[in-house]
C-alpha cells in the first residue's frame, strides 16, 4: 500500500516542479492526511519504513530518502544524495556529498544521525563513519583511493564538529 501521494500543490525551482506530499496511512509519527514537504517524484521517498519529508524541505533529482530517515526544516536534498537509516537532515549543514572519488568515482553522502553519529552511503556501502574508514583501508590499503577517502573522512569530521565556530 502506498504511504503518500503527490498533491496538486507545487513550487517550481530552476524549471523543476516539486510537489507537496500528503500521507495516506499512519506510520512512525506521521498520521494519514498529514501534509509533508516537497518532492519531485514519488521515487524520492521509499514507500517502506518511516522515511518522510517534513515542512518546507525539498527532495529532488535522483536523491532519495529511505528507512527511518527524516528530512525537515529548510533542507534541500538533491542530485544523487541518499538519506537513509535513521538519519535526520534538518538543514543544509546536516549532510555533505562528494562525487567523483575512489576507484569507481562514486557519489558519497555523509549525514548526522539522531544519535549524533555520522552515517555514510557510498555505492553499496552504508554504515557509520568508523566502519566506512575500516572498509576503505581493507579495500584500498594505502593506495591513492584510500588517501582520497581518508582525507574526505577528516574533512567530514571537521564539518560535523560542534566544538567551535
Image (tube, rainbow, N blue to C red):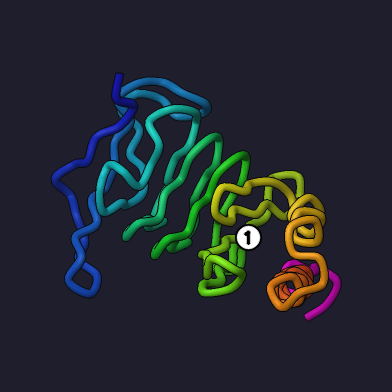
Q: Secondary structure at mark 1?
A: strand
Residue 47, how many percent across, how many down?
Answer: 38, 31
Q: Residue at x 35, y 47 (%)?
A: 44
Q: Which residue is mark 1?
A: 110
Total count of labels:
1
Residue 9, how many percent across, how many down?
Answer: 18, 49
**Quadrant of the image containing the N terminus:** top left
Q: Which of 156/147 is in front?
A: 147
Q: Residue at x 41, y 25 (%)?
A: 31
The picture quadrant where one finds residue 161 is bottom right
Q: Which of 74/98 is in front?
A: 98
- Magenta segment: 158-165
Q: Residue at x 26, y 54 (%)?
A: 40
Residue 13, how many percent across, how many down?
Answer: 24, 70
Magenta residue check for 78 = no
With 92 as the anchor, is 133 left or right in this view? right
Counting other residues with Cα less than 10 Å from the Cα at mark 1, is it few (<14), some (14-19), or many (20 or more)? many
Placement of 108 over or under 127, stated as above or below: below
With 30 as the anchor, is 23 left or right in this view? left
Q: Which of 154/132 is in front?
A: 132
With 155 as the anchor, is 28 left or right in this view? left
Residue 120, how many percent across, how many down?
Answer: 65, 54
Placement of 122 over or under 8, stated as above or below: below
**Quadrant of the image containing the C terminus:** bottom right
Q: Which of 138/27 is in front?
A: 138
- Chief SS of the magenta region: loop
Q: Residue furthest left?
A: 8
Q: Residue at x 22, y 74 (%)?
A: 14
Amino acid at each position: 500500500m502506498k504511504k503518500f501521494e503527490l498533491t496538486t500543490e507545487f513550487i517550481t525551482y530552476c524549471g523543476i516542479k516539486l510537489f507537496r506530499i500528503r500521507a495516506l496511512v499512519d506510520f512512525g509519527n506521521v498520521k494519514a492526511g498529514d501534509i509533508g514537504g516537497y518532492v519531485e517524484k514519488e521515487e524520492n521517498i521509499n514507500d517502506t519504513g518511516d522515511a518522510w519529508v517534513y515542512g518546507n524541505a525539498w527532495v529532488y533529482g535522483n536523491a532519495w530518502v529511505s528507512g527511518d530517515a527524516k528530512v525537515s526544516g529548510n533542507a534541500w536534498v538533491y542530485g544523487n544524495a541518499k538519506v537513509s537509516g535513521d538519519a535526520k537532515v534538518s538543514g543544509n549543514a546536516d549532510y555533505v556529498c562528494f562525487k567523483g572519488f575512489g576507484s569507481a568515482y562514486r557519489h558519497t553522502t555523509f549525514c548526522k544521525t539522531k544519535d549524533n553519529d555520522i552515517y555514510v552511503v557510498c555505492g553499496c556501502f552504508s554504515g557509520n563513519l568508523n566502519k566506512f574508514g575500516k572498509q576503505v583501508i581493507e579495500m584500498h590499503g594505502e593506495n591513492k583511493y584510500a588517501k582520497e577517502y581518508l582525507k574526505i573522512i577528516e574533512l567530514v569530521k571537521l564539518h560535523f564538529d560542534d566544538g567551535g565556530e
